[in-house]
Image (cartoon, rainbow, N blue to C red):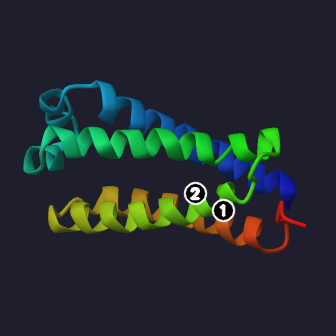
Amino acid sequence: MNLALWIAAGLLALVALAGGLSKTFVPKEKLAALQGGGWTGDVGAGFVKSLGVLELLAAVGLILPALVDVAPVLVPVTAVCWVLLMVGAMVTHGRRGESKLVMLNLAYLALAAFIAWGRFGPESFIG
């Protein structure tokens, strides 16, 4: 179970890193032109960059605290935050009729929920 949780956290961290880098450093206009990026046209550039920074923090928070054994409780806390982020993403893509992206966000949500459950529960870093 511990290995599965590490793999899940690593995969989700890669997703968060990729999303965070693109939202933080790619201009909003270029993101809007990409498939699935149309939602950026409905919000300000600062909002997009803020989401990008949050995703970069999530990438770090899913791995680093447990890796260096400093505040490892941040791993499941980060996973819970990712669940909330994915709920928002699902609502946004759902309103735009992007059902494939809703399903992708649901998969990410399930991965984060698994990490949160596992790290708060049976494979906790605490104790």
Left-right relation of 63 to 60: right
Residue in the picture at 31% in, 35% down: 23
Query: Furthest residue to the front?
Result: 70
Kindly tell me whether residue 111 is visible in this rendering.
no
Q: Are marks 2 and 1 in contact (CB under 8 Å)?
A: yes
Residue under label 1: 76
Residue in the picture at 64% in, 48% down: 62
Looking at the rendered image, the quarter that the C terminus falls into is bottom right
Image coords of residue 35 (percent x, y): 23, 40
Q: Residues within 10 Å of mark 1 (few under 14, many from 20)?
A: many
Q: Identity of the amino acid at label 2?
A: Thr
Image coords of residue 106 (percent x, y): 44, 65
Q: Nearer the viewer, residue 37 or 126?
A: 126
Q: Nearer the viewer, residue 66 or 1?
A: 66
3 versus 115 height, above or below:
above
Left-right relation of 106 to 61: left
75 versus 106 height, above or below:
above
Disc number placed over residue 78 in the picture, else none = 2
Image coords of residue 117 (percent x, y): 69, 72
Image coords of residue 49 (percent x, y): 28, 38
Residue in the picture at 84% in, 73% down: 122
Query: Furthest residue to the left?
Result: 42
Report helix, strand or loop for mark 1.
helix
Kindly tell me whether residue 102 is visible in this rendering.
yes
Q: CA distance from mark 2 to mark 1?
A: 5 Å
Q: Quadrant of residue 95?
A: bottom left
Left-right relation of 48 to 125: left
Left-right relation of 19 to 45: right
Report helix, strand or loop for mark 2.
helix
Q: Identity of the amino acid at label 1?
A: Pro
